[in-house]
């Protein structure tokens, strides 16, 4: 069973407070930090990836994890509701295609490699049937692309779109094999369109990708994020052009 995310955040906040860490400071090494928090390194890595997707930390491979902001109170900062998640997904339909179109104009080879590495991490999270890690990798993917626009407001906007409380994701984001295959296939298609710098495909592919995410959230029939049927024809028509 997944560790309670709020408790993990509270433990991390306590470590940061005890060590007097400030934005820009480096967190303790993984092994030490996991020991302080009494969790496995895999659990810690999942937590840090989620925080990176929200823009709260920066993970630099080979160097460590660095604070980007104060963590005080974040355990209670973002309590998700059905309506809040629905609004965030609707906002993603409005903003993400444009953000993606701008990002592909300037994406660098090094950043593309980072996205490919994220693709591998997403695949592993899906194989492990870990909904929170899947969500974190999706959020991080779009955040990295938003960074390519060079617009800090757009980066913050994307962070907010995917800032869903992990316990909410765990409960409602279904790791059904068919749904996950649709999401992963869409992920790969978006990467290919980025590689080809195909602005015509990227908008439609992003819309289809978001529809797959909607289906994952709605699979439990607990609530309706979005009336997918009313948007599917429009997205498919755009893809066919």
Image (tube, rainbow, N blue to C red):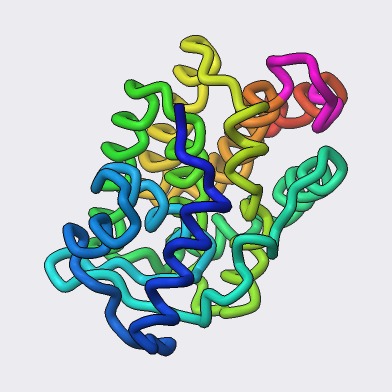
Question: Could you tell me residue 105's position as x and y percent?
Answer: 45, 65
Residue in the picture at 33% in, 51% down: 44
Quarter the N terminus occupies: top left
Q: Relative to 25, is 185 above or below? A: above
- Viewer-side residue, 23 vs 201: 23
Residue 192 figure quarter = top left
Would residue 204 be found to the left or right of residue 118 on screen?
right
Quarter the C terminus occupies: top right
Asked if the stretch drawn in magenta spans residue 222, the answer is: yes
- Viewer-side residue, 201 vs 120: 120
Residue 240 visible, this angle: no
Question: Could you tell me residue 177's position as x and y percent?
Answer: 47, 11
| Total numbered circles | 0
Asked if the stretch drawn in magenta spans residue 92, the answer is: no
Question: Could you tell me residue 140's position as x and y percent?
Answer: 45, 54
Residues rendered magenta in the picture: 218-228
- Magenta stretch, main secondary structure, is loop
Question: Could you tell me residue 148's position as x and y percent?
Answer: 45, 69
């Amino acid at each position: 069973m997944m560790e309670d995310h709020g408790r993990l955040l509270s433990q991390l906040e306590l470590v940061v407070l005890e060590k007097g860490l400030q934005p820009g400071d480096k967190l303790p090494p993984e092994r030490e930090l996991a020991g302080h928090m009494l969790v496995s390194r895999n659990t810690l890595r999942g937590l840090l990836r989620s925080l990176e997707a929200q823009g709260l930390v920066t993970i630099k491979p080979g160097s460590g994890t660095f604070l980007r902001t104060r963590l005080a109170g974040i355990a209670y900062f973002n309590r998700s509701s059905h309506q809040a998640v629905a609004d965030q997904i609707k906002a993603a339909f409005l903003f993400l295609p444009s953000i993606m179109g701008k990002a592909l104009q300037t994406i660098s080879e090094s950043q593309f490699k980072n996205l490919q590495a994220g693709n591998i991490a997403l695949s592993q999270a899906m194989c492990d049937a870990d909904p929170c890690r899947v969500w974190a990798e999706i959020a991080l993917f779009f955040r990295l692309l938003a960074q390519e626009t060079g617009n800090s407001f757009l980066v913050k906007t994307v962070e907010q779109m995917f800032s869903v409380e992990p316990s909410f994701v765990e409960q409602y984001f279904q790791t059904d094999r068919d749904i996950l295959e649709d999401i992963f296939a869409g992920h790969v298609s978006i990467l290919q369109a980025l590689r080809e710098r195909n602005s015509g495909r990227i908008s439609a592919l992003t819309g289809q990708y978001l529809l797959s995410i909607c289906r994952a959230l709605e699979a439990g029939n607990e609530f309706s994020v979005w009336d997918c049927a009313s948007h599917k024809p429009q997205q498919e028509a755009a893809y066919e052009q």
